[in-house]
Structure formats: C-alpha cells, structure tokens
Amino acid sequence: MRVQVQYANRFAATIGFANETIDIKPETDIAGLMRTIAAKYGGEVSQQLLNEAETLQLGLLICVNDQQILDPSTHKLNNGDEVLILTAVSGG
Amino acid sequence: MVYHSLTDADRARYEWQMSVDQFGESGQAKLKNASVLVSRVGGLGGPAAYELAAAGIGRIVLAHAGNTKPSDLNRQLLVTDASVGSPRVATAARRLAELNPDIVVEAIPQNMSRENADEIISGVDLVVDCAPLFDERYTMNSAAVRLGKPIVECGMYDLEAHLMLVVPGETPCLACLYPDPPAWWQRRFPVFGAVSGSLGCLAAMEAIKHIAGFGETLAGRLLVYDLRQMTFRIVKLARRAGCTVCGERQIGP
C-alpha cells in the first residue's frame, strides 16, 4: 500500500523536497514508516528521525490525515494516509 | 478589579476595528479590561506586542532580559539602530507607549524562569509565549496551566511557523505535543523578520479573539505554515492522558 509523506521544513531541506509517496507493507505502523524513510535516506535524515535505540527522536510531532498521533509507535497506517512529520520549533 | 468603560477617545481611536463583525464595542471593552504578558519582545514578541497595543489591550507586560544587539535588527521591530547597547525591553515599552499612550505598559528586564513565572503569570489574563528556548517555554506552559491562564504558543524555524492556543483544562498543552524538546534545537536559528513578524501578528489575533470571545481560535489545533512554499494547514491536536503538565490531576483552579 501507499502513503503520502509530507516533510516539515528541516526534513525537506535535508531530503531536498517536501513530499513523496512511499510504498509500505500492510499493517505497517508509523515507527515502521520512519525506519523505512531512515533506511532510504540514511545519514542526517536517519539521525533526525530515530535515536540510537531505533525509536523516534524527541521533539517530533507526527500527524496522520491532519490529526496528531499520540503514540506513533503503535499507530497502524492505511492505504492513502497522509503522514505529516513535524519537529518542535520555538520562538525568538 | 475596577472595570474601565470605553471613553469617547477610545471610540475615536478604535472605530475601524469596532466595526468588525461580532467584535464591536463590547469586544473593545473586553480588550481594554484585559492584561497580556508577552514573553520576549524580539522578532516574534515585538510585532505581537505592537499589534496588541494598537488594538487596545489595557495592560501589557513585557518580559525580556538583555540589551539590543546589531544582530537583532533584522527582525526585532520595536528596537532601533540607535538603541543598540540599551536594555531591549525598555526600548520596546517606549515604542508601545508612543503608539498608544492610553494603555499601561510594564517592562520587566528578565526572561521567564521558574523563579518568576508564577508571580508574573498570575497577574495577567493571557500569555503570549515568544521565547526561543524550550526550557523557558515549558516553564511558562506549566505555570499557565497550573494557574488556569490561556497561553498562545508560537515558534518558527527558517520559513516555517507554528501557532496554537492552549486553554487549560480544555485543550492540549505544549507538553502534550512535545513531552521532550528536540535535542538539535539551538539558540540561534535561521529566520527572516517577515516570518517572525507574520507569526507575531497571527499570535496577537489569537489573543484578541480569545479575550473578546469571537471568531474561531486555534484552541486544540496547530497552524503550520511554510512561507517557502506558501502552504498553510491546520492539524487537530490531542490531549495526552499522562501529560505531566496538564494531565487531569495537574490542572489546578
């Protein structure tokens, strides 16, 4: 199945574009999608998404179909879902 | 608390905005009797405070430590080239008083911290959080939730900006979105004044709508916009049941 992934500014700057379609297996959860993206791009993208324990980095906000997902590690994705990956930003 | 009615001078000053649908004289009177803390008056808080002063918020408290630096001038619109080296918050307070001498402006030459947050926030009706450091933001979020004060949260990076309104007891708080800050965040980040200024204006409008009670605020929702691509979207937020700040047991009167 396929999901649309929207990358927030910092990810988009690293990857080089702001959205793409990614093929994933049925029953894939958000953590699985993050591992797929991390493996695809490696390096800085991987470090921004996953920590050394291969779990999601701190300060990420993951939304599916414009709804915040409180527990991304167990949220199963559906075909056609739109996944938005944001990082916390601050003022100044 | 003394209630301040609108005067003829108020009606003359604010007549253009009092013609806004669903706002009117009653909305203007609510602004006149309201107090707002703007934490930091830089590229974000400066324009926010300026718009709040122009709109007639009766009492504005500004909190920001330090002196103006040359590198502030690309975005911090309340300070001037001539004020470099001078206390930033005092310059900002003067600018607001020049714009609107009918309101009360208080300048606190301190950043928000665990030592001063409760005292300062307990004295206002609403907080606009424009702080650049997450520790400061989490401190204000905790104090505002504990004291039952709404807080407008705003942040940006590069050409991207985020905005939300936290209403204690009703909506998610900052810690519901981000239980922990991002490890990569640094004090200096890329920003144009036009990005921080746009966000400051939107933050002021959220404060005005909430205080006056009209329109649809961002309570429980996060606005995310990216001026690099001119995209705007709103996502629905969720309260985190085990939130260490606004979880059921933490919310006080």
Image: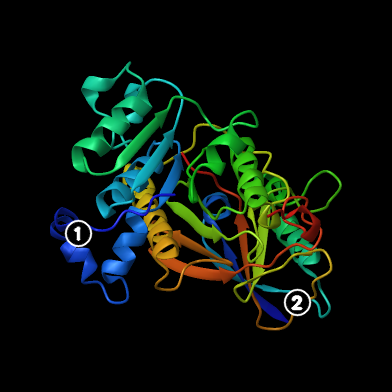
Q: How many marks?
A: 2
Q: Is residue B155 visible?
A: no
Q: Amino acid at mark 2?
A: Leu
- Toward the front, the furthest residue is B2
Which residue lies at the image location 21% right of the left edge and 21% below the top edge?
B82
Q: CA distance from mark 2 to mark 1?
A: 51 Å
Residue B236, quarter of the rendered image:
bottom right
Q: Is residue A42 left or right of residue B62?
A: right
Vertical position of residue B86 compared to residue B108: above or below: above
To the question of a shared chain for discs 2 and 1, the answer is: no
Which residue lies at the image location 42% right of the left edge and 57% below the top edge?
B207
Residue A64 at x, y = what percent?
Answer: 66, 73
Q: Nearer the viewer, mark 2 or mark 1?
A: 1
Pointer 1: what residue?
Answer: B14
Residue B103, quarter of the rendered image:
top left
Vertical position of residue B83 compared to residue B57: above or below: above
Q: Which chain does tag 2 point to?
A: A
Q: Name the secondary structure under disc 2.
A: loop
Taking depth in this image into account, of A92 and A9 the one nearest to the observer is A92
Q: Residues within 10 Å of mark 2 (few under 14, many from 20)?
A: many
Which of the labelled discs sits on residue B57, or is there none?
Answer: none
Which of the labelled discs sits on residue A77, or is there none?
Answer: 2
Q: Amino acid at mark 1?
A: Tyr
